[in-house]
Image (cartoon, rainbow, N blue to C red):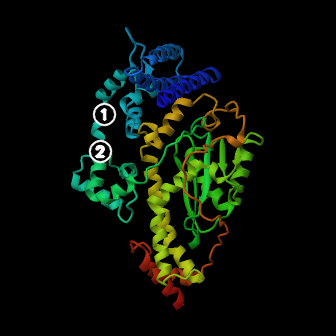
């Protein structure tokens, strides 16, 4: 009976929580839809309990009544965004919806399904179906027709030297390379390539937690990653809290505020200026803070600082970055150091290491960022960060979100009651932090301009796949001049 009582208490808690949210928040279609999904699951399990405990029939009646009320409320709501709807012709009879080929091709290329496109454009599924047929656009035809052998070769190349890459990240990397491959085909290919690696990844499943901010560009999380700081490398990154879109990822050999600010500005050139930014208390973030306060204004939480554990969105991405990219360099540099080929106290060795490997690290970061933005999120019904960003922009334009609406017009201020608690999830699992060593100094070039020119002419740092031979050749050249 303890389990029965526990089910009753959990059902009561869910119903009270939904009722409280519906009464205290501005009800919109998204909130109604989320409530209906939760109640549907609760109703299904309550009916299962009725097969053994008839006392739960009353609970089923309450749930059905509440769902009917929410569905009625949902039907009375206006569409969230009106000016993105498809245009109607002014012909005799019922007007036809006119949707451009470019608009459909753009959404199909972004990976949206037919029903999702219909929801975004506020038309029926049949309208999208007819439009796709008239333009000769096939969603299924967008999948790559490569053979299993070719797919295995691509998967083997992506996972070469890094067995921690999972199915979703591999699928994202394939899509960034222009190959849209079904999820099941990628899973089967990973098994064919390395079954043992699949089993080992299964042991490290991650618990998903709830996170909520207003929309795209409402809050960016920025941080510096210090996994390679022992060898003088710092990675500056930023991620959009709503969509998980990685907006910038830059390798550097210092931890200065100017470097972080420069990396941040490259992100704003592509995605616009966010409404707010959250970071930890690192001094490298002061330049970004000064810019945000000057651009968005003071006393509104334009730049929010807090503990690193409150910066979950990007801390979570660092976990995947190490597993997917930087762990390779961590192991390589450790091997060079342990074998005596790299002396951390020798400035010539450190300069050569940076000269050879900064482009390689940056290239790995670019590949990771493209794959990350295309990988599907199980907690978002299989949508990618790119899809979430586009969908959020289209749905929430004109609703008062500064990060979206100031691209077109000045929007009303978004009200945040407690800036210190905005964009925090205390329970999410994040990457473990290294020792908070933030002092990184640039190593001066040991060569004069003429010798440096000779080095670049005689040594092609891109010729060696791993970079070890190039590093040793660079050290030998510097010691000989």
Cβ–Cβ under 8 Å for marks 2 and 1 = no
Corner quadrant of residue 252: bottom right
Left or right of 410, for residue 107: left
In-image side of 392 versus 129 (left or right): right
Count of number-bearing discs? 2
Residue 100: % across, % down: 40, 29
* Residue 94 placement (x, y as % from top left): 38, 10
Residue found at the very far right of the displayed protein: 299
Residue named by callout 2? 184
The extreme bottom residue here reads 480
In which quarter of the view is residue 190 placed? bottom left
Q: Say which label, 2 or 1, has the lower sequence index.
A: 1
| Residue sitting at x 49%, y 71% | 357
Q: Is 372 located above or below residue 75 in the figure?
A: below
Residue at the image point whose x is 71% and y is 60% from the top: 283
Taking depth in this image into account, of 395 and 232 the one nearest to the observer is 232
> Helix, strand, or loop for circle 1?
loop
Q: Nearer the viewer, mark 2 or mark 1?
A: 2
Q: Residue at x 33, y 61 (%)?
A: 157
């Amino acid at each position: 009976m303890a389990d029965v009582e526990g089910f009753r208490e959990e059902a009561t808690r869910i119903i009270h929580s939904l009722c409280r949210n519906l009464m205290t928040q501005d009800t919109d279609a998204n909130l109604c839809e989320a409530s209906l999904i939760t109640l549907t699951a609760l109703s299904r399990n309550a009916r299962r309990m009725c097969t053994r405990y008839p006392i739960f029939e009353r609970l089923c009646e309450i749930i059905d009544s509440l769902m009917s009320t929410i569905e009625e409320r949902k039907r009375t709501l206006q569409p969230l965004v009106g000016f993105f709807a498809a245009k109607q012709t002014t012909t005799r009879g019922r007007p036809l919806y006119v949707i451009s080929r470019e608009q459909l091709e753009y959404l199909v290329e972004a990976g949206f399904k037919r029903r999702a496109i219909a929801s975004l454009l506020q038309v029926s599924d049949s309208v999208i179906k007819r439009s796709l047929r008239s333009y000769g656009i096939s969603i299924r035809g967008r999948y790559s027709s490569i053979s299993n052998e070719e797919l295995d070769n691509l998967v083997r190349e992506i996972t070469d030297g890094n067995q921690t890459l999972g199915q979703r990240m591999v699928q994202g990397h394939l899509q960034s390379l222009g190959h849209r491959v079904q999820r099941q085909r990628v899973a089967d290919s990973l098994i064919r390539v390395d079954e043992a690696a699949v089993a080992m990844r299964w042991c490290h499943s991650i618990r998903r937690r709830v996170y909520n901010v207003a929309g795209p560009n409402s809050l960016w999380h920025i941080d510096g990653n210090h996994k390679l700081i022992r060898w003088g490398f710092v990675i500056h990154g930023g991620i959009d809290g709503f969509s998980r879109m990685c907006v910038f990822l830059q390798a550097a050999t210092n931890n200065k505020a100017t470097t972080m600010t420069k990396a941040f500005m490259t992100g704003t050139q592509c995605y616009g200026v966010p409404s707010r930014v959250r970071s930890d208390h690192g001094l490298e973030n002061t330049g970004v803070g000064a810019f945000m306060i000057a651009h968005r204004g003071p006393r509104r939480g334009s730049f929010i600082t807090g503990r690193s554990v409150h910066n979950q969105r990007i801390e979570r991405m660092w976990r995947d970055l190490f597993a997917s990219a930087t762990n390779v360099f961590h192991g390589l540099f450790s091997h060079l150091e342990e074998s005596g080929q790299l002396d951390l106290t020798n400035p010539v060795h450190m300069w050569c290491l940076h000269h050879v490997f900064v482009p390689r690290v940056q290239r790995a970061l670019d590949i990771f960022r493209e794959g990350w933005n295309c990988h599907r999120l199980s907690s978002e019904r299989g949508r990618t960060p790119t899809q979430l960003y586009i969908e959020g922009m289209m749905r929430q334009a004109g609703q008062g979100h500064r990060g979206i609406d100031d691209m077109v017009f000045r929007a009303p201020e978004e009200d945040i009651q407690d800036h210190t608690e905005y964009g925090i999830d205390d329970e999410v699992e994040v990457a473990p932090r290294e020792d908070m060593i933030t002092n990184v100094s640039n190593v001066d070039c040991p060569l004069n301009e003429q010798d440096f020119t000779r080095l670049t002419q005689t040594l092609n740092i891109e010729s060696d796949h791993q970079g070890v031979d190039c590093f040793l050749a660079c050290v030998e050249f510097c010691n000989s001049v």
